[in-house]
Image (cartoon, rainbow, N blue to C red):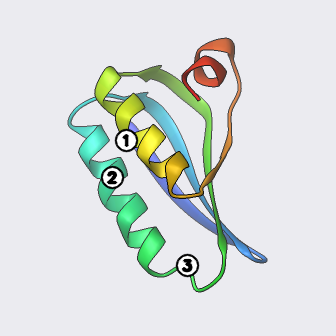
Amino acid sequence: MLRITTIEAGRQRKLVLEGKLIEPWVTELKKSWLEAKLSLNGHRLVIDLCNVTVISPQAEGVLLEIKREGARFVCGGILNKHVL
């Protein structure tokens, strides 16, 4: 299971992810990211992976796509840092 929480703070929008980043939740992450991206209005997008316990290969691809689009990542743990 994956929980995605959106937090607006100042000039940034943060998507906080908690749980396993595997299918079918990878699709939900992509939907949440696309929705957030469309309404940024100059805000910076931050993806918080500190409480993600598993990242599937499909999720890695989506995270790299999000990174290429300019999002900043906050993460803990060696696995999450290695992926990014």
Cα separation, mark 2 vs mark 1, equals 7 Å
| Numbered label attached to residue 30 | 2
Would you name the residue on which mark 3 appears?
A: 40
* Nearest to N terminus: mark 2 or mark 1: 2
Quarter residue 32 falls in: bottom left
Q: Is residue 16 visible?
A: yes
Would you name the residue on which mark 1 appears?
A: 62
The crowding category of the residue bearing disc 1, from other C-alpha atoms within 10 Å (few below 14, some 14 to 19, many at least 20), is: some
Cα separation, mark 2 vs mark 3, equals 15 Å
- As drawn, the residue found furthest toward the right would be 10
- As drawn, the residue found furthest toward the front would be 68
User: Callout 3: helix, strand or loop?
Assistant: loop
User: Callout 1: helix, strand or loop?
Assistant: helix
Judge whether 76 appears above or below 28 on screen. above
Q: Amino acid at mark 2?
A: Lys
Judge whether 65 appears above or below 1 on screen. below
Cα separation, mark 1 vs mark 3, equals 19 Å
Circles 2 and 1: CB atoms closer than 8 Å: yes
Please name the residue shown 46% across and 39% down the image: 64
